[in-house]
Amino acid sequence: MKKTTLLILIASLLIILTLIFTIIYIKNNHNKTEQAKSLTSAIDELQNQPISENKTQTITNTNIQNTGEKIAETPKIDNFNIYRGSWFKIEYPKEFIANPVSPIDSYRDYSGKENGIKYIQTDEARFTSPDKAIEFFVFSPQWAGDPINYLTISDSEELVSEKTDESSTNLGKETTKWVTIKSKDNSYYRSYISIKTQDGATHHVFGIKYKDNATYEQYKDSYILLKNSLIQYAD
């Protein structure tokens, strides 16, 4: 009798455990499905954002050196700061942390005299929110080239989505690529747009790293403002 009772208890326990694991499995799959749906929404939205015409705006370095290009002006966007790289200027949310912050150099006039305007010797920069939930990225060299590692999918990442568009302009072929990558542990996603113009003679990259679709939606407007604020310098 005792043996029968014990067997019944063990069987009941196994049934309960099976039900628990089944519920957990269904819940996890549901969460993954919902996450995938929301991520698809973010990817679609990113791929349909207008490409800022400011990416082709140029201001000669000579003008910067001689007149300062009013380069010490306040940001055009409220609650944003100005970041100056070697050949670009961009605005980013004031509370974000910019990187890199060195090496620092100054613009100079024809005589070699510094005009007091500082910039960071870099072609790329990252801007991270205080809680590290979001990170913006920009790569804007004088002409062509690729960012350091940003376009590479690491061993801990995998490709989610990729789309390429090619068009002809009066300056040659323009290739635009949208890519979304995720970490294998699902801790983050990162999406970027790569724009190569004049048959690859120039290259710009904008990127955003985010925890999930809700985080992306929270910072989407700031990301668009950042992209639209880019000013490219040329000599």
Image: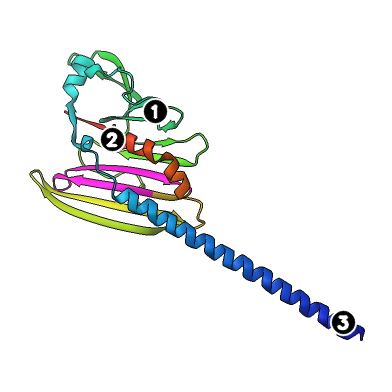
Left or right of 151? Residue 216 is: right
In primary-sequence order, the first of circles 1 and 3 is 3
Left or right of 17? Residue 46 is: left
Against 58, is 13 above or below? below
Q: Position of residue 121 (x, y in %)?
A: 32, 29
Q: Residues within 10 Å of mark 3 (few under 14, many from 20)?
A: few
Q: Which residue is mark 2?
A: 228
Q: Residues within 10 Å of mark 1 (few under 14, many from 20)?
A: few
In primary-sequence order, the first of circles 3 and 2 is 3
Which of the 4 image quarters holds residue 222?
top left
Q: Which residue is mark 1?
A: 102
- Is 196 colored magenta in this rendering? yes
Main SS class of the magenta portion in the image: strand
Q: Position of residue 217 (x, y in %)?
A: 42, 44
Q: How is the image coloured?
A: rainbow
The label nearer to you, 3 versus 2, is 3
Q: Amino acid under label 3?
A: Thr
Q: Are marks 2 and 1 in contact (CB under 8 Å)?
A: no
- Is 146 colored magenta in this rendering? no
* Viewer can see residue 126: yes
Q: Amino acid under label 2?
A: Asn
Against 55, is 21 above or below? below
Q: How many labels, in total?
A: 3
Left or right of 187? Residue 51 is: left
The quarter of the rendered structure image containing the N terminus is bottom right
Residue occupying the point 53% across, 63% down: 30
Q: Which residues fall within the magenta stretch? A: 191-211
Q: Position of residue 148 (x, y in %)?
A: 34, 44
The quarter of the rendered structure image containing the C terminus is top left
